[in-house]
Image (cartoon, helix red, strand yellow):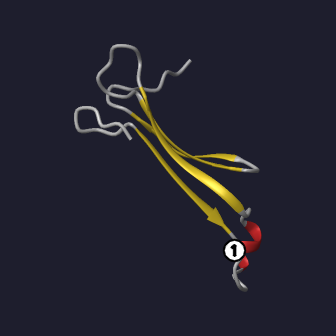
Amino acid sequence: MEVQEGVVTDIQAFGYEANVGNDPRSEAEPCGPWCYFRQDLYFSGRATPFLLIHWKHSLDAIRILDIIPGDRTRQVVN
């Protein structure tokens, strides 16, 4: 990972889920490899991100886990 001014902007983690034992949660959860991502999104020329996204990608789905607005990011209501 590249560090710029003391900050890592993209984080990736990898793992594997498997049904183990008699845990009822394991039946409902998909099995197999997964990747966890944290990504900071920037507008051109801005020093801080406008949005931080945490998401998990597996063989059968992409799940958005968290969306965090950055500094000076506001909701636009029509």
Name the one closer to the observer, 68 or 26: 26
Give the residue at mark 1: 25
Tell me the residue at 52%/22% (across/down): 77
Please state the horizontal and vertical placement of residue 15, each as a whole percent of the image. 58, 60
Please state the horizontal and vertical placement of residue 39, each as a whole percent of the image. 46, 37
Name the one closer to the observer, 12 or 27: 12
Tell me the residue at 32%/18% (across/down): 46
Tell me the residue at 28%/38% (across/down): 7
Q: Quadrant of the C terminus?
A: top right
Name the one closer to the observer, 71 or 9: 9
Horizontal arrangement in the rendering, residue 35 relative to residue 40 (left or right): right
Please state the horizontal and vertical placement of residue 40, each as a whole percent of the image. 42, 34
Q: Quadrant of the N terminus?
A: top left
**18 in relation to 9, above or below:** below
Tell me the residue at 33%/14% (across/down): 45
Q: Secondary structure at mark 1?
A: helix
Horizontal arrangement in the rendering, residue 29 relative to residue 66 (left or right): right
**4 in relation to 60, above or below:** above
Name the one closer to the observer, 12 or 76: 12
Horizontal arrangement in the rendering, residue 74 relative to residue 32 (left or right): left
